[in-house]
Image (tube, rainbow, N blue to C red):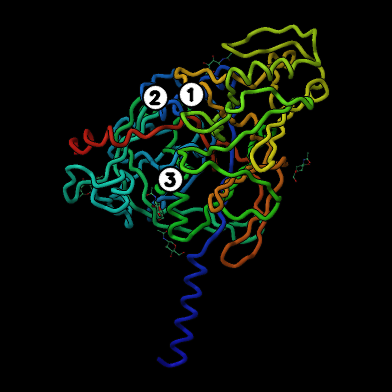
Amino acid sequence: MDLKYLLITIALEILCVVANGNSDLVFQVERRKTNLSGIKDHDDRRRGRFLSTVDINLGGNGLPTQTGLYYTKLGLGSPKKDYYVQVDTGSDVLWVNCIECSRCPRKSDIGMDLTLYDPNGSDTSESIACDHEFCSSTYDGPIPGCKAETPCPYSITYGDGSATTGYYVKDYLTFDSVNGNLHTAPQNSSIIFGCGAVQSGLLGSSNEEALDGIIGFGQANSSVLSQLAASRKVKKIFSHCLDTIRGGGIFAIGELVEPKVSTTPLVPNMAHYNVVLKNIEVDGDVLQLPSDIFDSGNGKGTVIDSGTTLAYLPDIVYDQLIPKVLARQPGLKSSIEEQNFHCFYYSGNVDGGFPVVKLHFEDSLSLIVYPHDYLFPYKNGMMQCIGWQRSVTETKDGKDMTLLGDLVLSNKLVLYDLENMAIGWVDYNCSSSIKVKDATTGVVHTVGAHNISSASTFLIGRTLTFFLLLTAMLNIFVTRF
Ligand SMILES: *[C@@H]1O[C@H](CO)[C@@H](O)[C@H](O)[C@H]1NC(C)=O
Ligand SMILES: *[C@@H]1O[C@H](CO)[C@@H](O)[C@H](O)[C@H]1NC(C)=O
Ligand SMILES: *[C@@H]1O[C@H](CO)[C@@H](O)[C@H](O)[C@H]1NC(C)=O
Ligand SMILES: *[C@@H]1O[C@H](CO)[C@@H](O)[C@H](O)[C@H]1NC(C)=O
Ligand SMILES: *[C@@H]1O[C@H](CO)[C@@H](O)[C@H](O)[C@H]1NC(C)=O
């Protein structure tokens, strides 16, 4: 091989590495406003999902409500078309409504036109047959009765009983890759996602939450994050900052350089993002709790879930926490509003009148929850309501679960470092920016906040997430095809 040819080859290889190398992605984040019962209904459905991992007898949790809804816009196929999908850290698979779907919504009340994905309308679409490696690894083994050319099925059932069923396809995903300070360029990668043919329940009807689909940011190999990481497009690290005060926020995949974030280990082999909570401190007093109250296992443990709005504690924790939270204000006139919200008349500055709550985690990581985060104004600010909730659930296992949602996570930069199996956070101004490092070039770029109108770019994490009824639905589906 002559030298010139060798140099060209090396140059091409370097170019390929740069083009395909790890990059940082940004997502614009939008948060929707909602009312009290909306929040509760939303979380009820969400909890249904968690429970359902423990007790499949769940479902049937209520009606559509509008809740803290986040979405993003992403491009699929070639030529690329845009799809609006909810972003959810509590689920894994990306799916969009497909051309075969007769009952899928065509327009969202949020304002955007919805698009059905048509495999035949994309030059780069490939079908994923049931004997494809992705299919067997998703189902933990070969698909019973799989015949060549039969599409690999998927089926997801949500806590509220609504479901999406379809088949996997492979096509190009186009996303915003960070290539400068506050600057991005489109990049693409071939990924496998669900083509939703049959939607039932809320997903099959037009309602104000209607979107094209859902993108899960879970840990499973089937998630877009894992697929991008497997094709060396990204590191499995992302962070979000949800600004509940102004709306919008920051959401980026990539190695976080600034701010510095301390972390606590993720409990391994869990479907969700579980951490080890050690104790809770209010006004300098540590709550006196049984030593095993926060143990993981048997449906217990502490789950970090940005798709849940409030925070849910076992009874024994709740019963000690609330009196301590209210201890500085003995004369409050309290009442129960809209279902289970403990509210009271209070017109002063809540941060002056109530204590901070500190949650202490393994590896000395603390989460400080300020009164303005765990209390929220009600009745035009005449009243304040407590966001902490009892983890009221139908199974005895789920009852001991601690579920920490946006109530404690918002206005913080939350880092999910799956490369090191750790999660962490730091108080942060979600209207500002963060710095992420390009893993290939080592160049550090600034990624800013976005606060887009709902007719444009991104919503993250709706809230009903789901559990997979994969094996149960599988046979039915294969038969139908
Ligand atoms: C809250 O929102 C839900 C769903 O949009 C609606 O049905 C309900 O009437 C609202 N409640 C109040 C008190 O506005
Ligand atoms: C993917 O990106 C490459 C390189 O930027 C580009 O040439 C190609 O057209 C893109 N493909 C799609 C489907 O967008
Ligand atoms: C795509 O085209 C093929 C061949 O024309 C047809 O059999 C198939 O049903 C089409 N698929 C969809 C989803 O329209
Ligand atoms: C996920 O992918 C990794 C790396 O490809 C592999 O080692 C692991 O076994 C996969 N896990 C499952 C559950 O398939
Ligand atoms: C947060 O950051 C934004 C943008 O940099 C800035 O305008 C705002 O003043 C900051 N807020 C606080 C409370 O520091």
**Residue pictured at 45% horizontal, 58% vertical:** 188
Q: Are marks 2 and 3 in contact (CB under 8 Å)?
A: no
The answer to whether residue 71 shows anywhere in this view is: yes
Q: Secondary structure at mark 1?
A: helix
**Dot 2 or dot 3, earlier in sequence:** 2
The residue furthest bottom is 2
Residue 287 appears left or right of 226: right
Kind of residue at badge 2: Asp
Image quarter in which the N terminus is found = bottom left
Front one among 194 and 303: 303
Kindly report the distance in space between the C-alpha atoms of the residues bearing marks 2 and 1: 9 Å
Relative height, residue 330 to residue 226 (above, below): above
**Dot 2 or dot 1, earlier in sequence:** 2
Residue 184 appears left or right of 170: right
Residue at which label 3 appears? 220
Q: Nearer the viewer, mark 3 or mark 1?
A: 1
Residue at which label 2 appears? 55
Determine which of the numbered discs, if any, sits on residue 398 in the image: 1
Relative image position of residue 438 (x, y in whole percent): 60, 61
Q: Are marks 2 and 1 in contact (CB under 8 Å)?
A: yes
**Residue pictured at 24% horizontal, 50% vertical:** 129
